[in-house]
């Protein structure tokens, strides 16, 4: 009877943790929606929803089998030899009650890794290309990384029969497995997809702008809401990764919850304070940047994810402070290199995922490693300056993740781009993906004159009325400019560089106003 009760409690704990991790999808959706312009809100949120939908199906069919197939609950007599990929339990065949709820927990992680890319590619990525990416990452790319590091038969796993450097890679909740995987995919996709129109280059001449144009999100409220949802959900992500409260699991979960909180707090404070000081030194006037604080908190959460169960609380604060600095540096580096990231997902997830894995090799304490990973082969060099085994294993793990994702996802995105399935058409991008793909804007303000209803279902072809899709999109642009004139009592104001109204993030209910570039081609028929 006690065994049945313990099993039920264990299943409920994983169900609770799975629900928290899955709730991250709501946080990502709100954060992404607030970080884009009004004309792209529906498109961005739909991609977040599709990550959950397509991810669930692909992870059910093959993803879980590739990640853990044949390596769950191995007995002493079972073969524990290292394998590159799982080969059993496709379509969840042969799983017991605990393994079924474990599938749910692992699916929530897979969906989180895929959703990281949604924000980076916001406002310019086609729906078909994004769906193909989401299925590929959750069904194959991500599961291979999971198998290598978290499966008992992975060559980087600390639970393997013969761990790498006697210790293996320690990534308790996924700074590397989840965030570096999604982050490197985001970087590759952003480079191949290119920046949003007018972000770094003049739309008419194609020449680089002297100063990159800052494209602000339309809702700071949604950004704050999304950040708090993500922080709340991280208490399932990190403490939940203990998977059971039996034995020393309760103490591991307690430590993970505390270090998660401290690192997030330190990251937010460090990022905000440092950004304020830099701005004051440069302009002579101090400003407090909300986005710097929010992304600093998220950076701290990402960085502590690998070592949350093996570092001391004071080390979590150090990791969080440095994560805030890593975020600021990498965000500015992306702008300098003209890589467009609509929500700063690359600095948050990739840069700080790397820092989180490295920091575990520096600050992991031996007694915590023994409880969380059942090994005492090594600890961070802060405690043993002569032992570099753990740090070496961490670096090897990072190299594997970056190499694996780059070798497969790089050509994948190039093929999508070559087929014309990746980048949205220039005219569709200017009008807004909500109207172009979803038939209307996300918001319907009474103060804003209603746009005429257009049938945009016939891509690039003449409609029954003899008007092509391209011509209808141009008419919508004209209506947007007319709406601005009606509201403002004068001509719509356009930027001399891009034709985009400078009040991107204003409180006005009107959408952006545009000059109509004469060289925009009709949308391609896919």
Image (cartoon, grey):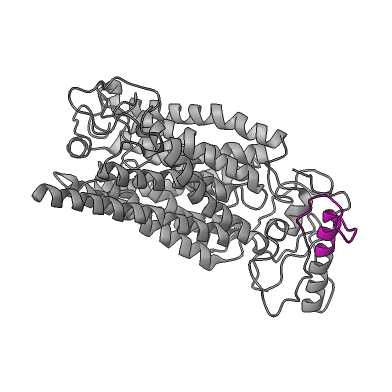
Q: Is residue 117 above or below residue 76?
A: below
**In the image, what residue occupies the spot 61% across and 29% down?**
411
Q: Is residue 518 above or below residue 442?
A: above
How far across and down, in percent of the image, does residue 397 sit?
39, 28
* The quarter of the displayed image where residue 500 is located: bottom right
Q: Quadrant of the C terminus?
A: top right
Q: Which residues are magenta?
A: 456-477
Is residue 347 one of those drawn in magenta?
no
Q: How many marks?
A: 0
Residue farthest to the front, as pictured: 93
Is 370 on the left-hand or right-hand side of 479?
A: left
* The quarter of the displayed image where residue 20 is located: bottom left
**In the image, what residue occupies the spot 57% across and 56% down?**
46
Tell me if I can see residue 262 in this picture. no
How far across and down, in percent of the image, does residue 469 sit?
82, 55
Which one is nearer the viewer's eye here, 484 or 470?
A: 470
**In the image, what residue occupies the spot 56% across and 32% down?**
409
Is 481 on the left-hand or right-hand side of 233?
A: right
Tell me if I can see residue 442 in this picture. yes
Is 499 on the left-hand or right-hand side of 221?
A: right
How far across and down, in percent of the image, does residue 393 sit?
34, 26
How far across and down, in percent of the image, does residue 464 sit?
87, 59
**In the image, what residue occupies the spot 84% across and 72% down?**
491
Which one is nearer the viewer's eye here, 507 or 39?
A: 39
């Amino acid at each position: 009877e006690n065994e049945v009760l313990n099993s039920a409690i264990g299943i409920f704990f994983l169900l609770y943790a799975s629900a928290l991790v899955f709730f991250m999808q709501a946080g990502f959706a709100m954060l992404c929606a607030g970080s884009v312009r009004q004309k792209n809100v529906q498109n961005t949120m739909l991609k977040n929803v599709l990550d959950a939908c397509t991810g669930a199906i692909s992870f059910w069919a093959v993803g879980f089998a590739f990640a853990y197939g044949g390596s769950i609950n191995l007995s002493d007599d079972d073969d524990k030899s290292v394998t590159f990929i799982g080969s059993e339990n496709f379509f969840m065949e042969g799983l017991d009650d605990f393994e079924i709820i474990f599938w749910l927990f692992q699916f929530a992680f897979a969906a989180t890794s895929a959703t990281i890319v949604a924000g980076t590619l916001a406002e310019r990525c086609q729906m078909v290309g994004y769906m193909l990416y989401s299925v590929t990452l959750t069904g194959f790319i991500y599961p291979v990384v999971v198998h290598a590091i978290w499966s008992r038969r992975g060559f980087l796993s600390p639970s393997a029969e013969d761990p790498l450097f006697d210790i293996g890679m320690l990534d308790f909740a996924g700074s590397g497995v989840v965030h570096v995987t999604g982050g490197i995919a985001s970087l590759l996709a952003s480079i191949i997809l290119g920046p949003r129109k007018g972000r770094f280059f003049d739309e008419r001449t194609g020449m680089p702008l002297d100063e990159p144009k800052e494209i602000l999100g339309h809702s700071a409220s949604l950004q704050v809401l999304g950040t708090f949802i993500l922080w709340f959900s991280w208490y399932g992500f990190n403490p939940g990764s203990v998977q059971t409260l039996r034995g020393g699991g309760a103490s591991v979960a307690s430590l993970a919850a505390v270090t998660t909180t401290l690192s997030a707090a330190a990251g937010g404070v460090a990022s905000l304070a440092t950004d304020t000081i830099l701005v004051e030194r440069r302009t002579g006037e101090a400003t407090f940047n909300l986005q710097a604080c929010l992304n600093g908190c998220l950076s701290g959460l990402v960085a502590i994810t690998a070592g949350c169960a093996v570092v001391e609380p004071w080390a979590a604060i150090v990791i969080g402070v440095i994560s805030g600095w890593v975020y600021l540096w990498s965000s500015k580096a992306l702008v300098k290199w003209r890589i467009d990231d609509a929500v700063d997902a690359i600095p948050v997830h990739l840069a700080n995922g790397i820092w989180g894995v490295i920091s575990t090799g520096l600050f992991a304490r031996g007694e915590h490693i023994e409880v969380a990973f059942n090994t005492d082969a090594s600890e961070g060099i802060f405690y043993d300056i002569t032992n570099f085994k753990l740090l070496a294993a961490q670096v090897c793990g990072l190299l594997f993740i970056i190499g694996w994702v780059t070798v497969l996802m790089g050509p994948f995105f190039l093929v999508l781009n070559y087929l014309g399935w990746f980048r949205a058409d220039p005219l569709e991008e200017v009008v807004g993906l909500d109207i172009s793909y979803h038939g209307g804007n996300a918001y319907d303000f009474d103060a804003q004159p209603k746009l005429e209803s257009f049938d945009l279902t016939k891509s690039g072809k003449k409609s029954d009325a003899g008007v092509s899709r391209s011509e209808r999109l141009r008419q919508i642009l004209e209506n947007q400019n007319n709406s601005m004139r009606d509201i403002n009592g004068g001509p719509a104001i356009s930027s001399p560089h891009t034709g985009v109204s400078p009040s991107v993030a204003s409180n006005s209910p009107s959408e952006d106003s545009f000059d109509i570039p004469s060289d925009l081609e009709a949308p391609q028929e896919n």
